[in-house]
Amino acid sequence: MARLIRTEKEVEGRYEEVWTVVEEDALDQWPAGPLEVVGQPAQRQDGLQRARGEARYTADVRLPGMLHAAVLRSGVARADARAIDVLPALELPGVQAALSCEEVDFLDAEAGYPGAAVAAVAADTIEQARAGVEAIAVEWDESEPLLDPDEAIARGQLVSESSSYERGDLEAALAGADVVVEAEYRTQSVLHNSMETHQAVCHWEGDTLVVHISTQYIWGVRDELAEKLGLRPDDVRVVCEFMGGGFGAKNGAGDYSLIAAELSRRTGRPVRCALTRREENLAAGNRNATIQRLRAGARSDGTIVGLGGEFVNAVGWSGWLAGTDGPMQMLYGVDNVATMLRGAKLNSAPMAAFRAPGFVEGTFGLECLLDELGGKLGIDPLELRRRNHADADVLDGRPYSSKSLLECYRRAEPHWDRRHEVRARSDETWKHGVGLASQVWYGGGGPPSYAWVRVGSDGSMTVVTAMQDIGTGSRTAMAQIAAEELGVSLAQVRVELGDSARGPFASISAGSSTIPSMGPAVRSAAGDARRQILELAAQRWQKEQRTLSLKGGRIVCSDGGSWPLESLLGLLEDAQILGMGARGPNPTGMRVLTFGVQVAEVAVDVGTGEIRVGRIAAIHDVGRIINPLGARSQVEGGIIQALGHTLSEHRLLDPRTGTVLTQTLDAYKLPTIADVPEIVCEFVDEPDSHLTNLGAKGLGEPPIIPTAAAIANAIRDATGADVRSLPIDREEMLRALAALARAKERSGDRVAARPA
Amino acid sequence: MQLVRPSSVEEAVAALRGGAVALGGGTDLVPLLRDRIVEAETLVELHAAVPRGVRRCTPTSTSPSPSSARFWIGAGTPLAVLEAEPEIPTTLREACRLAASPQLRAMGTIGGNLLQATRCWYWRLKFPCWLHGGETCDAKEGQHREHAIFGNERCASAHPSDPAAALLALGARIRTDRRDLPLAELYRLPTDDDRSMTTLEPGELILELELPAAESSIYVKAMDRQRWAFALVGVAAARVGGETRIALAGVAPVPWLVSSPEELEQATPLPGTAYKLEIARALVQRALAQL
């Protein structure tokens, strides 16, 4: 039965109290450990389709009569489009329509960053559309851009209200501490660079707008487009069957889908609006840069008594305050914490969520600070983290629904113990070291989400839900869950997803929420179908329903009898069994979080500043693992993406004009396969007994969070140098080594000057 | 745009008269055309016209050490062939192997590689910079972490070719459709009056390279990642006829010869390229130690 409850909803670490309709979750959790299908490694059901090029991505959608849209973007960081004349574009061959910020409100004449869209043209070919864009006459009124985050804060140019947090008395705690460390950390802006750029193809079928779009949130796009175009939500159909990556940047509809929809409305033809790689790196979101001025104090026994942080997020022209302060508030059981988070409004492209926004940046600062503190205290980094473990949620004292961070630490020991052997490999040139870092993140998901399961007389079982698989293998995981519940093999279950007109509401694929939000709904629907199958079986074989179960493709009775499932389903003919399921509520009064630890081994060439990461061991606690193969793939992807963030990726701006200098993939340096270290991956794999019928949390984001700090701490272990700024490129590494040499020289001088 | 596909050097040279642009592997030219940094009405596809391949050849009178073996390389030879050629000097083979990606090396020719345009982002983004005929070098004022530490008075761009440094260290010569010259004379620092980086005349076509066998040679390269990146600093060192030469990639607007490690101290790094000098010192020392 559905209930209306008041509950906390969390997306990417942002909480709000909302009224939500929830369905009771009647199923008990399965026993821990690998089951028949769930917990067994499963290759992706659509792997061959993808490998053979048969999977149709938005980038592959070519509709009859389709037009191509090109976008006129500001070439400078700060300008107002005073007057725009699109008529010259309309006179060019092939151009069918044009629109500008003077007539539609989803484009803004105030262009606050390079790449801000102000007009668009649809033409028969993309080349004609681009020629049209070049022909548009714009009178620009340019002004001096603001690019320095500290300057923006000083001038009070903020994107939103600053966020301050305090528990206990930090200043008193630091005054009474035996050891205090203080350091400034910086993280750079990085670009998502999904393989598939942001894009949409829109067309109208009568009054219905059909949108093919590369998106992480089919239903969000539906609602956003309906609202902005003045349509009823059900008059917008959103389709995304396959997707080439999003990483947080594709949570919204984006101006490109509005451009395509409006140009399609005007021309009566389908319109494709796809960003080029360069546009992608100009105006499709980024992880914002941060400045973190941090303090920590501890007693000599290693008890951290206070943590303080002043954080600046260089948000850009618009965006929100990602929780750079979150790890400092949440990771350790520290009584006195004070943080201040400010968001600088700058003439650079708006940030977008990027895989654990805020926590990647904040964990780099906090976990490096912790090692600097451990160094002064003379306490082993792993031991320091154990001693400051939080046994209950530090924000408000509520219990964790589950937490196995200490178990992660225990499993990290053999990897951590390798440090003696690794350090011993050092020579004059290459210095070897090991570092670790912990991680906290959300990932509990939440209601509402729905799924249906259809069982036909041919024995086929189809999961139907209008969710998206953003490339993480969600489709396969959902099939595993349904197969387990229905007692059939994975091959017998198909999953139909990716179309808002062909399935019930499904949650956003963001905030590590797909498995914990959708998985329980799918199990619930499969459970409903199972119940109906057993109802019919009880009648067919004159048994009590409670004595029957489904196992290995058979109906099994506790009295020893069993019948093949098809002997019952064959009787259905055109009748179908339709199971319906919904995601139940999260446990009340509990904090649902994910935890983990990573151990990195690095080698540093002290002559040239080259850094090689040799091995990363990742141990994560995300509740039950549905597909160990898919989970491993998530961890590898997260670590590789983190590697780029740590060592080589950097969105560089011209300091005077704000122009993005790294628009192409030769200049913007993603890691290559040659950069990828050995990755060892372990999961605690213990179901969260309080969380849903699955006990599974999300894994999309946790593995990218601790990597940068683990690598930086390994570099310190190897060389003694403090690297406090990302990326740790050759310049930063050599700077840190030179600073260390100067510090040694100074302390040497002091020693020499000391009277005998 | 028109594409002509001559089948002999004579036809190619004739086709190149009147402003046509030569197309080798196209790995650099095609992006430049797309960005309209290079404008061309006619492209002359060199594949069937310019020689390819590697062979040992007899010393010529211009050879520095006439007694030693020499190699002839067709200018149309892809880098992918050279990186797998066991006979040629190590420095050239390694410089090819460490360049770009396998796909790019399969397409890119050694002749085209010598003439690659700089990766300077200001130049590529068509800032009206000094190299594009403007007044000032935007990189010097702006973001220049990948830029020059030598020869950067007017323009701080860095030359991207790894093989060019290797060939310079080897003392290679090139033959064009009209002359024979040391590779060192192919390059020039641009001046206010003439901002080109090479001494090639309009329509002049590089046909062949000739280089000596080295007693010992090496190429070492510092990059932002392990593969597929232009050199922050590339160091080629070769001992030929008892004489050791060092040449650097990625440190000046053109491939840069240094007569001795001490000459590195005459570098003029920018605030953001000082780290490159440190890398150059370390790599030169290591290269010489391993010769």
Image (tube, rainbow, N blue to C red):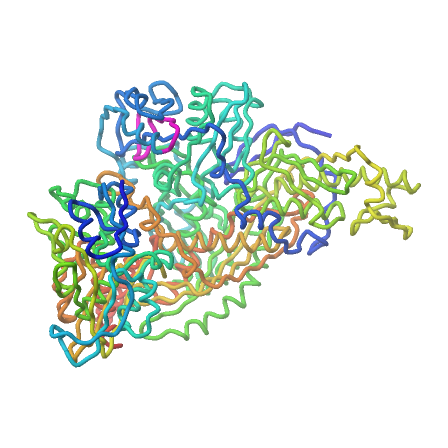
Query: Looking at the image, which is closer to me, A744 or A288?
Result: A288
Where is residue A423 drawn, in percent x and y? 41, 72
Q: Is residue A170 visible?
A: yes
Quadrant where the C terminus of chain B sits is bottom left
Q: Give me the residue at 44% from left, 60% from top.
A: A676
Q: Which range of residues does the magenta coloring cover?
A: A110-126
In this rendering, position of residue A385 left or right of residue A404: left
In this rendering, position of residue B4 left or right of residue A422: left
Confirm whether the magenta stretch covers residue B238: no
Where is residue A635 drawn, in percent x and y? 52, 54
**Quadrant of res A315:** top left
Query: Looking at the image, which is closer to me, A532 or A755?
Result: A532
Where is residue B246 drawn, in percent x and y? 18, 70
Q: Is residue A261 above or below residue A170?
A: above
**Quadrant of res A528:** top right
In this rendering, position of residue A620 left or right of residue A479: left
Confirm whether the magenta stretch covers residue A119: yes
Quadrant where the N terminus of chain B sits is top left
Q: Is residue A94 above or below residue A558?
A: above
Number of numbered discs on residues: 0
Q: Is residue A398 visible?
A: no
Q: Give me the residue at 45% from left, 53% from top.
A: A305
Q: Is residue B110 above or below residue B170?
A: above
Query: Looking at the image, which is closer to me, A403 or B29?
Result: B29
Where is residue A349 drawn, in percent x and y? 34, 36
